[in-house]
Structure formats: structure tokens, C-alpha cells
Image (cartoon, helix red, strand yellow):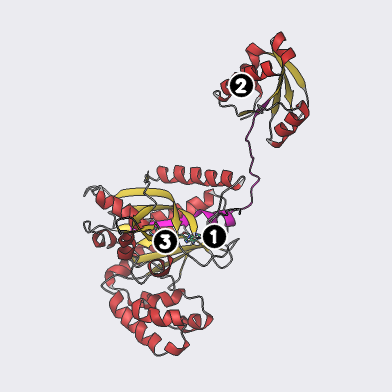
Amino acid sequence: MQIQSVKGMHDLLMPDSVQWQKIRAIASELFENFGFQYLEMPVVERTELFARSSGHTSDIVQKQMYVFQDKKGESFCLRPEGTAPVVRAYIEHRLYYPEAYQKFYYWAPMYRYERMQKGRYRQHTQVGIEVLGAHEPYVDAECIFLLTELYRRLGLAAFSVELNSIGDSTCRPAYREKLVSYFQAKVSALCEDCQSRLKKNPMRTFDCKNEACKEVSKKAPRILDDLCGPCATHFESVKQSLKELKVPFDVNSAIVRGLDYYVRTAFEVKSSIGLGAQDTLGAGGRYDGLVKTLGGPDTAGFGFATGIERLMLSMPSQEVSVGRCHVFVAVLGDKARAFAFTLVNQIRLKHIKAEINYENKSLKVQMKQADRLGAQYVLMIGDHELSEGKSILRNMQTQEQVEVAFSNIISTLEQRIQI
Ligand code: HAM
């Protein structure tokens, strides 16, 4: 029986894989320009890392983690998100210096046992950043600016930034009580999930897709009206800095995020193209208490992540040039093949993409293969050419053919091929 890939986890084939690599190159260059250093974490982490950071009541921890025990009975999981692992590495390697904050970026697959639909998969890849050790609202604005610049460089036009502040441990508890008593009065109208969220995390009701819950939460008290002085000042400064950086945004007091570690700034970037119900392209926020929760010093944090699959769905379709082959070496005869074997590898060392077929195929079949590979040129060598010390070079677009002495092959290719 044929074995297929795991549901919700996909192979990445051409031409998508070419576009994928381009996105990675653009993101890496941009993030490095902004002073972020690349960090690579293991795919497997201790389950406790996410239970303590994302929150016991979050959907990720409650329903979505791929958890398993190793032979000693310890509980591990496939990483569902990147912030907690970055913070773990930051603490483990003692990367905290009082004089400077640290900036990391990552490109990493994440695993969540989700109900699948377009833009929602069980393995997805995120590119994200985390800034550790900076409280200032400038950092929030700068990171949001950076994400919008990434989208701009990728050619995305129809996206919008939605911004909120979800307060902190000073102002959130009183707001939470107010919210619970509002929802409690309308509990029968809420879906089962929201009824149980009411005890654990009432703010999540704002995220519910159920129409009745949406209706109830429309009139619910919003935390923006109850922010404490420092949270309100922080939020005002973030908005002001975004205006200075000319980043358009809307304040949306229903943005609450599904992970427990956020405080103050929370934001999402939505796309109106290509994504349907899963319209959040990227998201993030501030998480000032997380380093401490995970055993490190009291350190501020801010970051975001954007899913590459969703990016690909909302990017304008591009003619991806396959570009797998500049020159195809077509061979006729065993002696010619032995010569061409060395030649093709010498050509490749000159940054020219060269291909060859080592089987004993007719010239017609080899020309077809060259065509399929998109070769600009075909270099023909038979036993006859071998005895004469020259080859025939055919331009596949113009069909023009010239003779090229063996000693001149590489220099001729270097002059003619467009890389
Ligand atoms: P998140 O909102 O859970 O945040 O995920 C970030 C992004 O990953 C989403 O906006 C979306 O583009 C993509 N994504 C999430 N789940 C899926 C899925 N099942 N299939 C496809 N794409 C998906 C976080 O993970 C936070 N760690 C972000 C962050 C970084 N906050 C601070 N720093």
C-alpha cells in the first residue's frame, strides 16, 4: 500500500519551493539589517516549557500539542510556537546583559494538532523575531514597522495592522472581574467553549467565531477603557511612534491573542487577499513577564511571527523562473560520455548550472530533457567531436549553432550564459 504524508503536513515542491527560498532570503536580509541575529532551536522541547508560557488554559496547550514520552517517561513535545523556546535559550545560555537588549530571529517549523482548512495546517513554518530586555514603546513600534516592511518587500498590498493593549497585572484583574460579570449575565447565549473559557480566560471570548458569542462580546466592556496609567501611556506612545514611522493601523479592542504571556501591546496583521477565514498573516506583542516565569531575570520582551504558508497564499502570483539548468551537455558515445562527465562537473564549479544524462539515450531524447529543464544552451559532444577536440554549442532560443574547441568551452559559456 502507498504511504502518504501525515494529514496537515505537506511536501514543498517546485515552483513553491523556489518562492519559499526567496521569502527566506528576503526576510533574513531584512532582519539582519535591523540588527537581529539568527537563532536555531531544536524541534523537540520539554512539554512543561509551553504549559508554563502559553498557559495551561490556552488552546495550544489544551488541545493542539503533539506530546510524547521518551523511554525514561519524560514528557516532550513538537514545538508549537517559537517565543518560549527563544526565551528558554536566552535563559539557558545567559544571554542577558544589562547594557544592551538582544534581538533574535528564527525560521522554524511549528506543530499544532488543528482542525484543518485553507491556511491552517498541522505543520506550518514561522519566521519571527524576539527582542529581549527592552521596555520602551519605541521597540513595539519598530517591530511592527519591520513586519509591515517585510510584507511590502514581498509585494503584499492588502494588509492591515490591528492594534490593542491588553493591560498588565496591575489593571487586568479588575477588568477581568468586570468582564466575567458581564458574560455571566448572558451565559446561556455563549457557546460551550466560551462558557468554560469564562472561568479560565474570559478575554478569549472576543476571539470566538460563533455568531452568538460575537454578538454578546460586541457590547462587552473593553480593557482599553480600564488601562492603568503606565499601560495607557505605553499604548499612546506606541501609537504615536507608529504614526511617526508612517505605519497605518486600526485600534481593535477585540485583539486578545490566544497565548497567556502577552501584556500591554498585542497586534495582528490581517490580509484581505487569499486567506479566507484564516486571515491573520502575522501577529505578536509584548511579553514582559515571560523570562521571569521561565526562571530568568525580570526581563521585558517583544516579538512577532508570521506564517510562511499564509504569506504564500496571499502574495501576488509570480512567474517563478525555474532556472535549474544553464547548459545541458548532450552526449553520444561511451568515450564522449567519460569526457563529458569530468567536463560537466568543471562547468558547475564556475557557478554555471550544468546537467547531463549518463544513460545511453538518443540525441532527440536528450534535447527533450534539455527543453524540460529550461536549458539556455545545449553542448553536444559525440565520439566524432571527441576525436576532433571540439564540441557544438546550440542556443536553444535562436537555434543558432557554433563550434567550440574543448579548450574554449568554459570561457565561451561564461561569456554567453545569462545567470
Ligand atoms: P500565533 O498567532 O499563534 O503566534 O502564530 C503566528 C502566525 O503563525 C500566525 O499569524 C499565522 O500566520 C501562523 N500560523 C499559526 N498557526 C498556524 C497554522 N496552524 N497553520 C498555518 N499557519 C499558522 C505565535 O506563535 C507567537 N509565538 C508569535 C509571537 C512571537 N509573539 C511574540 N513573539
Quadrant (top left/top right/bottom left/bottom right) for the N terminus: bottom right
User: Where residue 376 sits: x, y (%)?
Assistant: 69, 30
User: Where residue 29 sits: x, y (%)?
Assistant: 45, 42
- Residue flagged by tag 1: what amino acid is it? Lys
- Report the residue at 34% width, 81% height from top: 199
Task: Read off the residue under disc 2.
Answer: 341
- CB atoms at circles 3 and 2 under 8 Å apart? no
- Please tell me which of labels 2 and 1 falls first in the chain: 1
The 10 Å Cα crowd at callout 2, few under 14, some 14 to 19, many 20 or more, is: some
Res. 269 in view: yes
- Report the residue at 76% width, 21% height from top: 401
Of residue 82 and residue 172, the one placed in the foreground of this image is 82
The 10 Å Cα crowd at callout 3, few under 14, some 14 to 19, many 20 or more, is: some
Secondary structure beneath disc 3? loop
Task: Read off the residue under disc 3.
Answer: 66
- Image quarter for ligand 1 equals bottom left
Quadrant (top left/top right/bottom left/bottom right) for the C terminus: top right
- Residue flagged by tag 2: what amino acid is it? Phe
- Please tell me which of labels 1 and 3 falls first in the chain: 1
Residue 102 inside the magenta-drawn segment: no
Q: In which quadrant of the rendered view does residue 261 lie? A: bottom left
Q: Gap between marks 1 and 3, in whole Å? A: 13 Å
